[in-house]
């Protein structure tokens, strides 16, 4: 029978299956400081060991400061944050886990460093105690976020108790217009199916527009699958995938490489494979997207306006939108390009890779951040992304334009470190969630692509990036 | 894990769709390396008038009188009813930890986000999916009747209203069994050590590069 990519990945990892519940073998376990301390503690209390130490790769990212890192962990000002990073360091030492510590050039956001190191490979099952683990599905891997109890479970057993998800094919055919990015595709999909649209599903992204995306773009897209409610998003393997993986530190070498590639080429849905649901978009219809509210589904094209209540689908949504207007300080029918911003954040596991920084720099080059913008910051996804950007002179482009150039980490995507919005501040952000309080209590987040964030920084308000490119 | 069999509990309403895990437990409390003590900070940004940080004495903070769970009639509630896609966003298990520590043992909604739904079962917290119409009716009943209680019977998969109306709900057989008996997933999985080892050998010979 013709199989979907999801079926192939799932089936090839089933240890046992009973009454629709499978024990699924996990190939790669990525770990960060926030969701792991209780799992390590649980292992210690039960006297359990890690099942396979070399399947685990750890990195601190959520709590790390993005300025003045010269003192290392000891330099983290917040004592509770510092203790959490120290706890990860101590646990990794005790259990013998490979960790890229704060002072390691390879340190960065867990979902950036996995692929960058080749620790994420096609055909793998990848888990992490972090919902944006869906990112790794870009490689034709089955990857999703898990809770801390499951982190402990995978550490102790190398397996996860799983039921099969339903399958959703999201097909985007055609050619994306100039200045239209994977982020806009992701937001357009969420705008269409809603943040609960993917609940219970694993999404496969396909179609000519997806084939045309780079690996960075595919990672951005799969990263946002969770914002559509789907735990996992994935893209079939092709030359783009294989070329990206080749030569990375954890990638197979020599004769293993050829065997791996031969297998990876089978990682796509068979012709005639049946999906439980199909959604189609035309690439040509996708505009630069800007969220206006407090959920990623509250999104419109940059030439649109904040929707009015008569467009809401029911009373529950009407109430949601009214709360969102109040929280965001916006009125219905306000044109998006009249919304002024206070801060700009370019970074996060969604948009902090080298291609994202190149794209933002190309818009910012030779221009200045507008005077009403209090802070525009660029936070590279990893130490290696930062080094590459500096090699290309992107840091200078940003600094000359008035952006701050920071050290790698999750930063203001969720504001666990010192980077945050103050109450009422409005931010053009390349991150993934515009929830109330996400970037700081009372902060107002508008999700956009890196190009759109850079354009907003320069204009002081949202503006169609196609005027710049 | 604490077992769950039956529950007679006071119901509290949270009439919002898409309640995300950032709202259930804001990020600053995720810096804790413990798994308990999150209850006083559940819904922190909605519940208090000031900005909450770890280490504050929450009993001295000013409550937001407009937040529904602060109404005295809902004090001691162990069942939460809410709207679609509850628990969306981050995978933080601190969300069910906070709800459980607050005193909730069951949450009723028309739908839940997948990761949150899964995390609940690991913590003795029962997420129950009922239809939009039933949830609408329950919201009306809770708001109209002070001290409104529901009876939840997991073995029978039933939610019963004070007037005797019973609504059945679906629950996966394995999860139900584990929750009824308070079983630890890791212990159960480790009963299959031989199967895992056998799989691992086969997997390694097919894809040795995964084990480098």
Image (cartoon, rainbow, N blue to C red):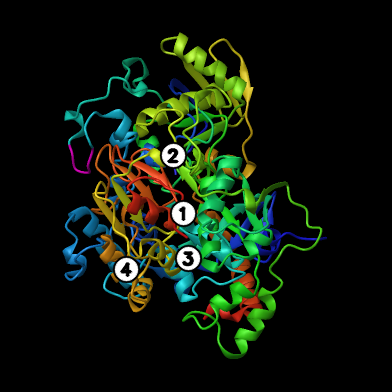
Spatial separation of the CA atoms under disc 2 and disc 4: 27 Å
- Mark toward the start of the polypeptide (2 vs 3): 3
| Label annotation for residue A467 | 1
Task: Tell me whether marks 2 and 3 sit on the same chain.
Answer: yes
Which stretch is magenta? B52-56
Numbered-mark total: 4
Q: Nearer the viewer, mark 1 or mark 4?
A: 1
Element marked by disc 2: helix
Residue A149, position as x, y percentages in the image? 45, 52
The residue that disc 3 covers is A29
The residue that disc 4 covers is A397
Asked if one can make out residue A406 in the rendered structure from this viewpoint, the answer is no
Q: Are marks 4 and 3 in contact (CB under 8 Å)?
A: no
Q: Nearer the viewer, mark 2 or mark 1?
A: 1
**Chain letter of the residue carrying label 3:** A
Q: Is residue B66 above or below residue A265?
A: above
């Amino acid at each position: 029978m013709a199989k979907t990519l999801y079926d192939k990945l799932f089936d090839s990892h089933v240890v046992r299956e009973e009454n629709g519940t499978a024990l699924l073998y996990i190939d790669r376990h990525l770990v960060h400081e926030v969701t792991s301390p209780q799992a390590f503690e649980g292992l210690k209390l039960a006297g359990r060991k890690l099942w396979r130490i070399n399947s685990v790769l750890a990195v601190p990212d959520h709590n790390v400061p993005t300025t003045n890192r010269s003192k290392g962990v000891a330099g983290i000002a917040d004592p509770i944050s510092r203790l959490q990073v120290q706890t990860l360091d101590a646990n990794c030492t005790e259990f013998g886990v490979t960790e890229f510590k704060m002072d390691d050039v390879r340190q960065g956001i867990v979902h950036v460093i996995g692929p960058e190191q080749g620790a994420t490979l096609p055909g793998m099952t990848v888990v992490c105690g972090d919902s944006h683990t869906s990112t790794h599905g870009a490689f034709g891997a089955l990857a999703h976020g898990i809770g801390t109890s499951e982190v402990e479970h995978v550490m102790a057993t190398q397996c996860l108790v799983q039921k099969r998800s339903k399958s959703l094919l999201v097909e985007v055919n055609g050619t994306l217009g100039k200045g239209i990015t994977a982020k806009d595709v992701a937001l357009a999909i969420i705008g269409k199916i809603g943040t609960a649209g993917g609940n219970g599903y694993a999404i496969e992204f396909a179609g000519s527009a997806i084939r045309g995306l780079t690996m960075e773009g595919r990672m951005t897209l799969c990263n946002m699958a969770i914002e559509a409610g789907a735990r996992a998003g994935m893209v079939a393997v092709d030359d783009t995938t294989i070329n990206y993986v080749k030569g990375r530190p954890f990638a197979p070498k020599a004769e293993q490489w050829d065997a791996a590639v031969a297998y990876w080429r089978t990682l796509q849905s068979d012709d005639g494979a049946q999906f439980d649901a199909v959604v189609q978009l035309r690439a040509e219809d996708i505009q630069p997207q800007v969220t206006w509210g407090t959920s990623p589904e509250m999104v419109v094209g940059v030439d649109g306006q904040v929707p009015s209540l008569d467009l809401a689908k029911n009373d529950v949504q009407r109430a949601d939108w009214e709360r969102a207007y109040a929280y965001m300080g916006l009125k219905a029918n306000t044109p998006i390009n009249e919304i002024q911003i206070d801060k700009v954040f370019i970074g996060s596991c969604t948009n902090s890779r080298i291609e994202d920084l190149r794209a933002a720099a190309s818009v910012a080059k030779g221009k200045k951040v507008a005077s009403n913008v209090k802070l525009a910051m660029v936070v590279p996804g990893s130490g290696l992304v930062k080094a590459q950007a500096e090699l290309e002179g992107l840091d200078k482009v940003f600094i000359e334009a008035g952006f701050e150039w920071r050290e790698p980490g999750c930063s203001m995507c969720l504001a666990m470190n010192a980077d945050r919005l103050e109450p009422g501040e409005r931010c053009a952000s390349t991150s993934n969630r515009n929830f109330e309080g996400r970037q700081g209590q009372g902060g107002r987040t508008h999700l956009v692509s890196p190009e759109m964030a850079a354009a907003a920084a320069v204009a002081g308000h949202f503006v169609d990036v196609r005027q710049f490119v | 894990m604490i077992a769950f069999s039956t529950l007679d509990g006071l119901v509290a309403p949270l009439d919002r769709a898409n309640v995300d895990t950032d709202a259930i437990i804001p990020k600053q409390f995720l810096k804790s390396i413990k798994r308990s003590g999150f209850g006083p900070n559940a819904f922190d940004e909605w519940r208090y008038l000031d900005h909450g940080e770890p280490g504050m004495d929450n009993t001295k903070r000013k409550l937001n009188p407009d937040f529904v769970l602060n109404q005295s009639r809902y004090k001691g509630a162990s069942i939460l009813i809410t709207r679609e896609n509850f628990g969306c966003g981050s995978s933080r298990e601190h969300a069910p930890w906070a709800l459980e520590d607050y005193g909730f043992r069951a949450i009723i909604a028309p739908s839940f986000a997948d990761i949150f739904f899964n995390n609940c079962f690991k913590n003795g917290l029962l997420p129950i999916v009922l239809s939009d119409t039933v949830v609408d009716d329950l919201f009306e009943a809770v708001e109209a009747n002070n001290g409104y209680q529901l009876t939840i019977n997991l073995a029978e998969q039933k939610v019963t209203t004070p007037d005797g109306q019973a609504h059945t709900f679906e629950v996966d057989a394995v999860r139900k069994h584990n929750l009824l008996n308070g079983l630890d997933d890791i212990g159960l999985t480790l009963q299959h050590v031989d199967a895992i080892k056998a799989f691992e050998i086969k997997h390694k010979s097919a894809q040795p590069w995964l084990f480098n």
